[in-house]
Image: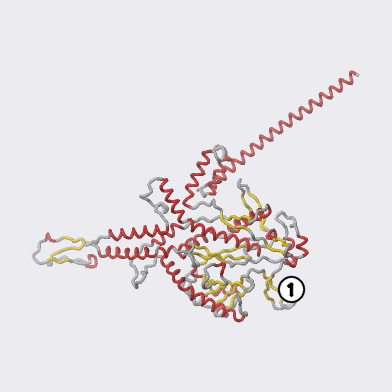
């Protein structure tokens, strides 16, 4: 897209944002309804009166689907060679170790609920140059509500957009600290934050709004523009390009400049000479063609990803719609009807009670605020006429209808009583319950696959950000199939390839990203635990009495997240080590005995030869 000059950019992007907001307003209204419904709103569609009582089945059904499972990364080479396979393995280990540094448990908790409530969630993946104990840099990730994301009008795929917006809140102090503006300049920032745009309910004079636009320039490279009100905060052409501060007068870097000229930020498109020592393979040897690299060193580019640093996770795909289907919207009719019925039940019970009956001339008085009403009898009636009248209305039909609507909502989403861990009159045997769980999990499988697809995109962004910004080699630790600790190295220059046809270098990013298929869903782990136990008893893992076999069994249970499996793995690892040491000792003793016997045989043979020589000498 063609972008105007810098002086006109803020007005240009502000106009684009207003146009996108107008086009997306109907969807934003739907998202607000979904959020309120999940939080237990008492609003009734088409009525100004609110429900007096509610039953939040939306919250209950969404929470039943939330999974703490985080898919494991898996990387394969598109075309198999031994070298590309080794690189794919190092990428996989890099993604796994990078994830360990991220608060993925907290992130997953927010993401799961946002996806089911809104129909999708937005992930922002950025490079943090200060991450790590040695400040070597790393990836950071944040989960953004769809209410804070404004797409390009008419586009339903993030990859096809020329631009998109993030709309979020911050404080004036953070504005000054992060973007280097003065307190006087911060007064020009926008304080009009539309409802739902912020992650918190903070408001007041210290709360300001930021508008962030990611766009692709005329060369197709990702750029970023940030502003607030009348204040331009950041204008980064070629957002992924490396940047350095240079003196405008002498051209030196800021640390070497002596003329005290005005410094400016500029993008680096080519590798500097200080990168040459790192252009080695993981084994420490120079890569093949390093001489050619040195020869053409000025033509080695930095890597720059081509996609926005945003990932869209959908609930379920919908044609011609950016987000997926919201669980809130598809069960909203049932939720609204249940709210009305619960209000009716509440009103009936509030009016219900026992009404006293008494003669008109009775001297006893009743507190009308407690009983609600009093029936007075005519004069001349007997004392036996004292009594009560039960005016409690029946709510049986209301309760039946509410439960019927609740079962409808569960069937729409695909959840059974067994899936929720409740008693199920239709599933009596254990096999029937397992079958119902499997059927419910099958209906929800498409949602799990969309989650796996989002995590595969996350791993690709982690890889490409390390290609772009990770200087030097990254040490990686891992465990192999036997549980042994190992060490690997990720070096971005291992992916630098020379293309003889065009006479230039490029970074090899031709790898397939997916997720491991052996990650068991939460409700299927019980079946997996039982299958592992059956394999142990059947002897398919080896001798069931051997510590090595038991170690294999507990490692399988640990991968399936069996409770306290880690402690059992450590116990049998120690037993296996002791057994190995004892075996090594026995072998050493046997070898020593063999050596002693061999030495004895050699001594006896030498003595025999010496004796024969003496006898031969005496005979002569």
- Residue 451 is left or right of residue 508, and the answer is left
| Residue 350 x, y percent position in the rendering | 27, 64
Badge 1 is on which residue? Answer: 252
Residue in the picture at 71% in, 76% down: 247
The quadrant holding residue 188 is bottom right
Tell me the crowding category of disc 1: few under 14, some 14 to 19, or many 20 or more residues within 10 angstroms, Cα based. some
Quadrant that contains the C terminus: top right
The quadrant holding residue 216 is bottom right
Q: Secondary structure at mark 1?
A: loop
Residue in the picture at 59% in, 58% down: 513
Quadrant that contains the N terminus: bottom right
| Residue 506 x, y percent position in the rendering | 69, 63
The quadrant holding residue 592 is top right
- Residue located farthest toward the top when viewing the structure as drawn: 619
In this view of the protein, which residue sits in the foreground, 155 or 269? 155
Residue in the picture at 47% in, 58% down: 66
In this view of the protein, which residue sits in the foreground, 329 or 36? 329
- Residue located farthest toward the front when viewing the structure as drawn: 501
- Residue 84 is left or right of residue 604, and the answer is left
- Residue located farthest toward the bottom when viewing the structure as drawn: 7
In this view of the protein, which residue sits in the foreground, 462 or 471? 462
| Residue 125 x, y percent position in the rendering | 58, 65
């Amino acid at each position: 897209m063609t972008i105007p000059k810098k002086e006109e950019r803020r007005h240009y992007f502000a106009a684009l944002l207003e146009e996108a907001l107008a086009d997306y307003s109907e969807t934003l209204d739907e998202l607000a309804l979904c959020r309120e419904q999940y939080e237990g709103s008492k609003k009734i569609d088409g009525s100004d009166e609110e429900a007096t009582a509610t039953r939040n089945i939306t919250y209950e059904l969404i929470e039943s689907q939330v999974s703490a499972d985080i898919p494991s990364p898996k990387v394969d080479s598109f075309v198999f060679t031994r070298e590309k396979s080794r690189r794919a393995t190092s990428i996989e280990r890099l993604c796994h170790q990078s994830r360990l540094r991220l608060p993925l448990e907290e992130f997953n908790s927010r993401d799961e609920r946002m996806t089911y409530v809104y129909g999708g969630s937005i992930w922002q993946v950025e490079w943090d140059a200060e991450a790590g104990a040695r400040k070597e840099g790393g990836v950071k990730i944040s989960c953004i509500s769809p209410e804070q994301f404004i797409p390009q009008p008419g586009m339903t795929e993030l990859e096809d957009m020329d631009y998109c917006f993030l709309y979020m809140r911050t404080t004036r102090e953070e504005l000054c600290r992060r973007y280097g503006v003065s307190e006087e300049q911060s007064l020009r920032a926008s304080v009009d934050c539309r409802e739902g745009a912020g992650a918190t309910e903070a408001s007041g004079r210290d709360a300001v709004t930021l508008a962030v636009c990611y766009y692709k320039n005329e060369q197709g490279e990702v750029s970023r523009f940030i502003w607030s009100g009348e204040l331009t905060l950041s204008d980064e052409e070629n957002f992924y390009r490396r940047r350095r501060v240079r003196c405008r007068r002498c051209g030196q870097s800021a640390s070497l400049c002596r003329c005290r000229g005005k410094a400016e930020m500029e993008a680096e498109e080519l590798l500097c000479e200080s990168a040459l020592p790192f252009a080695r393979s993981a084994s420490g040897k120079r890569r093949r063609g390093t001489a050619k690299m040195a020869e053409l060193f000025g033509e080695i580019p930095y890597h720059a990803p081509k996609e926005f640093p945003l990932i869209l996770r959908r609930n379920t795909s919908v044609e011609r719609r950016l987000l997926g289907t919201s669980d809130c919207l598809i069960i909203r009719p049932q939720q609204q009807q249940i709210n009305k019925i619960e209000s009716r039940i509440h009103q009936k019970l509030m009016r219900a009670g026992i009404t006293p009956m008494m003669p008109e001339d009775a001297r006893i008085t009743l507190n009308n605020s407690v009983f609600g009403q009093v029936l007075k009898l005519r004069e001349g009636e007997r004392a036996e006429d004292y009594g009560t009248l039960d005016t409690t209305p029946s709510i049986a039909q209301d309760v039946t209808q509410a439960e019927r609507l609740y079962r409808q909502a569960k069937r729409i989403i695909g959840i059974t009583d067994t899936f929720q861990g409740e008693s199920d009159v239709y599933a009596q045997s254990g096999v029937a319950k397992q079958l119902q769980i499997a059927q419910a999990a099958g209906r929800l499988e498409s949602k799990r696959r969309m989650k796996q697809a989002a995590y595969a995109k996350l791993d690709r962004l982690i890889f490409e950000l390390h290609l772009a910004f990770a200087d030097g080699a990254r040490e990686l630790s891992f465990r192999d199939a036997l549980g042994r600790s190992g060490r690997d190295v990720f070096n971005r220059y291992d992916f630098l390839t020379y293309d003889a046809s065009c006479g230039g270098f490029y970074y090899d990013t031709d790898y397939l990203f997916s997720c491991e298929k052996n990650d068991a869903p939460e409700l299927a782990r019980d079946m997996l635990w039982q299958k592992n136990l059956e394999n142990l008893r059947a002897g398919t893992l080896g001798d069931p009495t051997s510590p090595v076999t038991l170690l294999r069994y507990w490692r399988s249970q640990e991968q399936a997240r069996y409770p306290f499996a880690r402690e059992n793995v450590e116990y049998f690892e120690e037993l296996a080590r002791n057994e190995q040491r004892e075996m090594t000792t026995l072998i050493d003793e046997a070898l020593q005995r063999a050596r002693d016997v061999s030495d004895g045989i050699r001594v006896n043979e030498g003595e025999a030869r010496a004796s024969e020589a003496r006898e031969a000498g005496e005979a002569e």
